[in-house]
Image (spheres, helix red, strand yellow):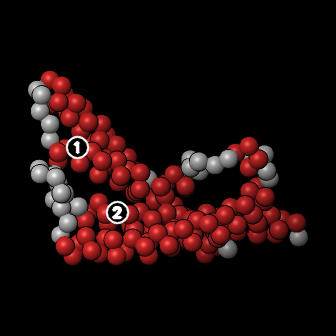
Amino acid sequence: MNLLKKASELIDKINTRIGNAVSWFTAALVLLVTYDVLARYLFNTSSVAIQELEWHLFAAIFLLGAAITLKNEAHVRVDVFYGKLSEKKKAIINITGTILFLIPFCIVLILASQNFVLTSFQIGETSPDTGGLPARYIIKAILPVSIFFLLLQSLSLLFKSILILLLKDAERT
């Protein structure tokens, strides 16, 4: 039991640090969009690279923020029934959903994205637009990396849920 708890705490710590770092991307995105709007409407100029950087940052925020969102239980969930359940029943739902849906989803997505990212690296993919960003493979590489951290966080959720069941059962004996 102690091993599950320590593993869960380590995973939580890793994803918290990533989440804190990624939160700065949000500030950068706000500044970038502000610059883009001011440049467009005050100076009648625009940059394809700036616009692409905006969606790259948004994608990174969304993808790399998935694990910390799961850790903080801030993801979308139908709370009509779940919120009224006991901790043990919530743990059973979390274990079932994590094993049947979340972990397989993460594994499939990591495996499916490998060739996508590898091909992009091999050809040195850049933006097809004139003035666009070079190294498009960097943003593509964030997909499997972020899903790996989501997979780790799903294991943390699984471990915590197992501990809840084990501790509840140990309290009864």
Residue 51 horizontal/vertical position (percent): 22, 43
Question: Mark 1 = which residue?
Answer: 51
**Farthest-out residue, top:** 42
Instruction: Tell me if I can see residue 144 in this picture.
Output: yes
The residue drawn where x is 88% and y is 70% is 173
- The kind of secondary structure element at disc 1 is helix
The residue drawn where x is 11% and y is 50% is 131
Residue 132 horizontal/vertical position (percent): 16, 52
Name above or below for residue 43 compared with residue 118: above
Residue 142 horizontal/vertical position (percent): 34, 62
In the rendered view, does 8 fall on the left or right side of 126? right
Mark seen at residue 142: 2
Amino acid on which the number 2 mark rests in the picture: Ile
In the rendered view, does 105 fall on the left or right side of 39? right
In front: 13, or 148? 148
- The kind of secondary structure element at disc 2 is helix
Name above or below for residue 85 compared with residue 152: above
| Count of numbered marks | 2
